[in-house]
Each structure stands twice: as structure tokens, then as C-alpha cells.
Image (spheres, rainbow, N blue to C red):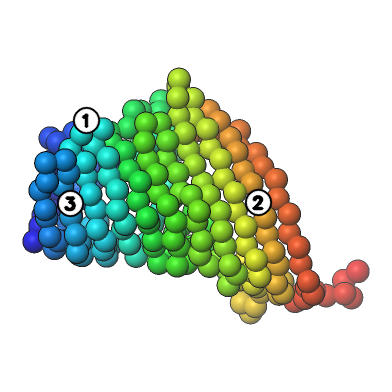
């Protein structure tokens, strides 16, 4: 059993840095630890970190690169938090996108990652997410991702890489059979203005020396294929 109101001091002393350091990291987990000559093996991990349920099995290599592998399951996951592993804080003290330079990574990881809800900054999350999480020198990525979005089958990948003072954001996203009503604006009586099903394909990319530059130079392309579309609350007499 490992139970700590704030494990941040230990992480700092051992050379690890995670997003939002300084705000506290409560941790309460149980696990079996096997210390081997080449690795620390954590099995049957279960408990809470940052008040979120976590479970899985992890192996941390004892080599200089400190490679983390295994599988990890969480209740909710924020893609912005993962991006901060490479970018550093996304926002400054005033809440604006940060102009801080991209820092260097502290360790490398290659994990099978699952989450009941993956948040990408949109109003609705990707539910039942599963994919591969990779983190290393100058890169953080979610690859081979699958899940459910707005009632449809979702798949895609997202990566942020950094080098020579520049960072590059790339992403692809597909949804088949999305419920348009779950994404639509609502009428005054809380009914969706649009209803129907759609297949969505989208790709994004950007680059910059900070999150502010990356956000300002974001570009992409996409397509939406829809079957029968119903428009609710439309007053044809107004024409």
C-alpha cells in the first residue's frame, strides 16, 4: 500500500516531472512490487491518483533512459495533460496560452492505455478509449486509438513532437455513424436543431515554438458524409 497526500516531493527528488507540478499529487494505490536487476515491476496496481481510479501493470527499466512499459487504465484522461509532458504548461498564470519554450523530457514510456473518457477539448469526450501511449525524447503520442464518439465508432491518432526549439502537432480522427443530434446546437426547448447520422473524417496539423504559436497556426481538412438530415425548429414562413 502506498498512500500519500502529495507524492510530488518524491518525484522531484528522483528526477521526474509531470504536468501541473506544484498543485499537489495525492496518491493511494495497492500493488505488488518486484525489484529485478534491470527493472522495477509493478503488478496488480489499483487505487486512485489525483482522485481518479487507476489500474494496470507497469515496468520501469533501471537503465539510464528509464523506460516505462505496460498497461494502464484510468477513468478519465485529458489529452491536454498528456501534451504538457512535451510542451510544458499550456497556459500562463493569466489563463492565456503559454509562450514558454518547449522543455526536455524526463523519461520514456510505451504503454497500452485505456480510459472510460478521453477529453480532447471538445464538449463531449471519446468514451471507452483504448490505444497506445508513447512518450520519449521530444514526442508524446496517442496511436491506434479507438472508442465511441457521439454514438459512433471513432478511431485516430494524435502526436506532439518537439526539436530544435520547434514543436509539431499532428492528428487524424474518424467517426462512423455519429449521432448528429448529440453534436448539434439545441433549440429553446432543448431539442437538437439537427438530427441524423454522419461519417466524419478530419486531419489537423500545426507547428510553433510555444503552445500560443501552435494554436495560432493550426490548420487542417476534413469531410462529413450524411444520410437523411432533419432540421428541427426551422420556420419556413420566415422566408
Q: Mark 3 or mark 2: which is in front? A: 3
Which residue lies at the image location 48% right of the left edge and 49% below the top edge? 143
Separation of disc 2 and disc 1 at Cα?
39 Å
| Nearer-the-camera pick, 115 or 59 | 59
Can residue 100 be seen in the rendering of this structure?
A: no
- Quadrant into which the C terminus falls: bottom right
| Nearer-the-camera pick, 93 or 183 | 183
Mark seen at residue 64: 1
Regarding mark 2 in the picture, which secondary structure is present there?
Answer: strand
Q: Is residue 153 left or right of residue 74?
A: right
How many other residues sit within 10 Å of disc 1, few (<14), some (14-19) or many (≥20)? Answer: few
Regarding mark 1 in the picture, which secondary structure is present there?
Answer: loop
Q: Earlier in the sequence, mark 3 or mark 2?
A: 3
| Tag 2 residue | 202
Residue 131 is situated, as x and y percent measured from the top left of the image, at 44, 56
Q: Earlier in the sequence, mark 1 or mark 3?
A: 3
Q: Is residue 81 left or right of residue 195?
A: left
Residue 93 is situated, as x and y percent measured from the top left of the image, at 35, 37
Q: Earlier in the sequence, mark 2 or mark 1?
A: 1
- Quadrant into which the N terminus falls: bottom left
Query: Looking at the image, do the residues carrying marks 1 and 3 touch, with CB atoms under 8 Å apart?
Result: no
Separation of disc 1 and disc 3 at Cα?
16 Å
Residue 123 is situated, as x and y percent measured from the top left of the image, at 52, 61
| Tag 3 residue | 41
Separation of disc 3 and disc 2 at Cα?
39 Å
How many other residues sit within 10 Å of disc 3, few (<14), some (14-19) or many (≥20)? Answer: some
Can residue 69 be seen in the rendering of this structure?
A: yes
How many other residues sit within 10 Å of disc 2, few (<14), some (14-19) or many (≥20)? Answer: some
| 216 vs 52: above or below | above
Which residue lies at the image location 24% right of the left edge and 58% below the top edge? 57
Regarding mark 3 in the picture, which secondary structure is present there?
Answer: strand
Amino acid at each position: 500500500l502506498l498512500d500519500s497526500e502529495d507524492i510530488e516531493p518524491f518525484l522531484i527528488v528522483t528526477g521526474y516531472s509531470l504536468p501541473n507540478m506544484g498543485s499537489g499529487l495525492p496518491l493511494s494505490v495497492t500493488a505488488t512490487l518486484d525489484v529485478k536487476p534491470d527493472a522495477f515491476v509493478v503488478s496488480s496496481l489499483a487505487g486512485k491518483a489525483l482522485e481518479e481510479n487507476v489500474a494496470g501493470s507497469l515496468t520501469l527499466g533501471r537503465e539510464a533512459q528509464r523506460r516505462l512499459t505496460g498497461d494502464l487504465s484510468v477513468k478519465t484522461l485529458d489529452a491536454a495533460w498528456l501534451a504538457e509532458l512535451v510542451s510544458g504548461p499550456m497556459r500562463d498564470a493569466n489563463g492565456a496560452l503559454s509562450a514558454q519554450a518547449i522543455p526536455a523530457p524526463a523519461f520514456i514510456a510505451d504503454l497500452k492505455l485505456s480510459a472510460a473518457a478521453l477529453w480532447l477539448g471538445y464538449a463531449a469526450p471519446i468514451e471507452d478509449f483504448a490505444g497506445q501511449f508513447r512518450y520519449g525524447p521530444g514526442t508524446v503520442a496517442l496511436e491506434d486509438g479507438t472508442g465511441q464518439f457521439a454514438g459512433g465508432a471513432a478511431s485516430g491518432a494524435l502526436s506532439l513532437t518537439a526539436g530544435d526549439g520547434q514543436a509539431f502537432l499532428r492528428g487524424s480522427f474518424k467517426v462512423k455513424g455519429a449521432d448528429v443530434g448529440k453534436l448539434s446546437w439545441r433549440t429553446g426547448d432543448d431539442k437538437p436543431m439537427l438530427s441524423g447520422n454522419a461519417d466524419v473524417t478530419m486531419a489537423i496539423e500545426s507547428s510553433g515554438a510555444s503552445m500560443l504559436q501552435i494554436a495560432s497556426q493550426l490548420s487542417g481538412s476534413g469531410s462529413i458524409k450524411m444520410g437523411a438530415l432533419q432540421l428541427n425548429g426551422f420556420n419556413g414562413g420566415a422566408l
